[in-house]
Image (cartoon, rainbow, N blue to C red):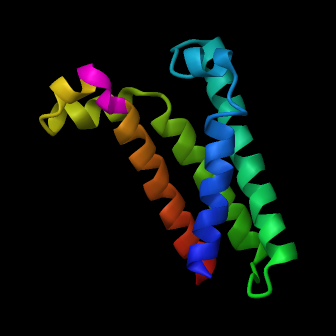
Amino acid sequence: MFASLFVLLYLGHLLADYPLQTDHQAAHKADRCATGWAANATHAATHVATCGAALVLGVVVLDDMNLSLPVALVALGWIGATHAFIDRRWPVQWWMTRTGQASWAANGGAAHVDQTAHIAALVIAALCLSV
């Protein structure tokens, strides 16, 4: 069940991060003002909604998908919170500066570290859901 859960959550993540993320959210989700926090929260809520919809689809379509509603709600909260935290951008910058990746960060590497952090959070959510 872990693999199915991860694929569903990853699909929700991709939908929320690319076709459903507005230009405004992408440009302002890390801003340190009310507009930035609102863009970040709206973007994170989109992740929760799309991942939630993906899980519902899995429960309806897949025979082996049995989820606890409280655990699913905690997992979705985890996804929203970690996504919002990572997308403030400073955590990725902090990581890359302290691990000797400043040059790579300056040449587009931050997007890769960002996505890796998001995927790690999804793996943790899928593991918790599959127990």
Q: Residue at x 72, y 30 (%)?
A: 42
Q: Is residue 10 magenta?
A: no
Q: Main secondary structure of the magenta part?
A: helix
Q: Quadrant of the N terminus?
A: bottom right
Residue 34 % position (x, y): 64, 14
Q: What residue appears at the point 26 percent right and 26 percent down from the top-left corner?
A: 105
Residue sticking out furthest to the right: 60
Q: Nearer the viewer, residue 38 or 87?
A: 87
Quarter occupied by residue 91: top left
The C terminus - image quarter: bottom right
Q: Is residue 109 magenta?
A: yes
Residue 41 lies, in percent from the top left, at 67, 31
**For this rendering, which residue is in front, 120 or 41?**
120
* Residue 120 point in image, percent of width and height: 43, 57
Identity of the residue furthest to the left in this view: 100
Magenta-highlighted residues: 106-110
Instruction: Judge from the rendering whether residue 80 lies leftward or rightward of residue 102; answer left or right.
Output: right
Q: Please name whichever residue, 117 or 94, is drawn nearer the observer in this view of the structure.
A: 117
